[in-house]
Amino acid sequence: MSELHKALGDISSIRRQMAHNTQFRGYGPATLAATGCLAILAASAQSIWLPDPATHIWAYLNMWILTAVLSVALTGVQMYTRTRRIYSGLSNEMIRMAVEQFLPALGAGVLVTITLVRFVPTMVWMLPGVWQLIFSLGILSSCRFLPRPMIAAGVWYLLMGLVCIALGNKRALAPWTMGFGYGAGQMLVAGILLIANSEGADED
């Protein structure tokens, strides 16, 4: 039995190593573009129903948290089905690798949001910038498994996060800070993946 367990452990290690050395193609360009459209729609809704989000901060948070949850759910379902189709036997390792890269950023975003809302509500205006800074770190930490041009998307979110924080106070809560930041950012991500997937298909 010990030899069997050792053999199974060796196979598992080989599969993990193969996953870490394989470019992840589980994100679909159309789905990520759709998440960008969700951000633009949420920003449009904010401009209509929340002209002054600073005085309705819970409505603002609920709107963007709901948008984030929908985006994560949409991306997660599509990533699972696409990865199972592309990688077959390696799908579990590839999905685990992708989740592990983004999980720290997602956890940090949740904890920072709770901390600011609960303990420093006067600084909630920083959230659009902080969210984009954290998202940029998630992308940059995943770049070793994604097409190299994805660094541009990470830099985009980094710059947009800094711009939002530099705006200060109520201006950082304006609809465009999230709508334009995530809308354009996700379109950029989708474009990079579309080109990379086309090149990968040509090579195959």
Image (cartoon, helix red, strand yellow):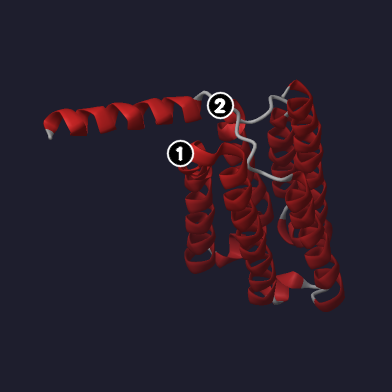
The residue type indicated by label 2 comes to: Thr
Instruction: Quadrant for the N terminus, please.
Output: top left
| Residue 126 on image: x %, y % | 64, 55
Closer to the camera, 185 or 98? 98
Residue at 65 percent across and 69 percent down: it is: 66
Query: Which label sits on residue 22?
Result: 2
The residue type indicated by label 1 comes to: Glu
Relative horizontal placement of residue 156, taking residue 126 as reference (left or right) = right
Closer to the camera, 77 or 85? 85
Q: Is residue 60 above or below residue 78?
A: below
Which secondary structure, mark 1?
Answer: helix
Q: Earlier in the sequence, mark 2 or mark 1?
A: 2
Give the crowd class for mark 2: few <14, some 14-19, many >=20 residues within 10 Å. Answer: some
Residue at 74 percent across and 56 percent down: it is: 35
Closer to the camera, 186 or 26? 26
Q: Kindly identify which residue carries mark 1.
A: 93
Closer to the camera, 173 or 145? 145
Q: Is residue 150 above or below residue 178?
A: above
Which secondary structure, mark 2?
Answer: loop
Query: Which label sits on residue 18?
Result: none
Relative horizontal placement of residue 32, taking residue 139 as reference (left or right) = right
Would residue 174 be seen by someone viewing this image from the given angle?
no
